[in-house]
Image (cartoon, grey):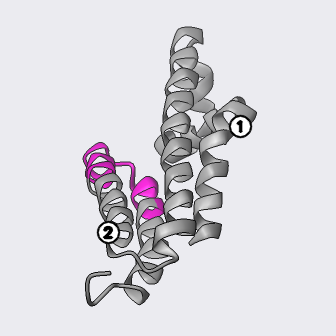
Amino acid sequence: MTVLIAAMLAMGLAPFLAPELVLRGMSLLVFVNPDVLGRLGAPVLGYLLFVHAVIGAIMTGWAALLLLVVRGPYARGSRSAWRAIALSVLAWFVPGTLLSLWAGVWLNVSVNLLFLALFAVPLAATRPTRAR
């Protein structure tokens, strides 16, 4: 799970390290056609860069916390740490995926399902059966 969380950290930092690249990548998720960006205008592009930076900051914070939990209490078998990870993943997955479905952004739904599976496998393998 540490490698997965490290990938989340990198994704969260990407809007700060490579904002234009992230803007193009996210536009592919939504518009499929990267040429759409050229028709949006400077104010809209500025707003999108801002929103991506805010989302990146939130993702970075969540990943940093997950990393501390995974490397600490979760590694020691804490049931509450397991539940905190599982709950935070579901709290991200359910609304994010429902919103993507509503907006018709099917590629993001696929990415969300991939990340859910990558979290679900180690969580299922370590599900506590008794309180610790």
Task: Give the left or right position of residue 27, taking residue 89 as reference.
Answer: right
Image position of 44 with respect to 4: above or below = above
Which numbered tag is attached to residue 2? none
How many residues crowd around disc 2 within 10 Å: few (fewer than 14), some, or many (20 or more)? some
The answer to which of 42 and 71 lies nearer the viewer is: 71
Residue 103: % across, % down: 30, 43
Between discs 1 and 2, the one toward the N terminus: 1
Q: Which residue is mark 1?
A: 21
Magenta stretch in the rendered image? 95-111
Secondary structure beneath dot 1 equals helix
Residue at 47% x, 81% y is 122
Residue 124: % across, % down: 37, 85
Image position of 115 with respect to 52: above or below = below
- Count of numbered circles on the image: 2
Amino acid type of the residue that numbered disc 1 sits on in the rendered structure: Leu
Q: Looking at the image, which residue sits at the far front?
A: 132
Task: Give the left or right position of residue 44, taking residue 20 as reference.
Answer: left
The answer to which of 130 and 94 lies nearer the viewer is: 130
Which numbered tag is attached to residue 80? 2
The answer to which of 97 and 24 lies nearer the viewer is: 97
Residue 98 on the magenta span: yes
The nearer-to-camera label among 1 and 2 is 2
How many residues crowd around disc 1 within 10 Å: few (fewer than 14), some, or many (20 or more)? few
Secondary structure beneath dot 2 equals helix
- Dividing the picture into quadrants, the one containing residue 8 is bottom right
Residue at 42% x, 89% y is 125
Residue at 74% x, 34% y is 17
Residue 116: % across, % down: 41, 68
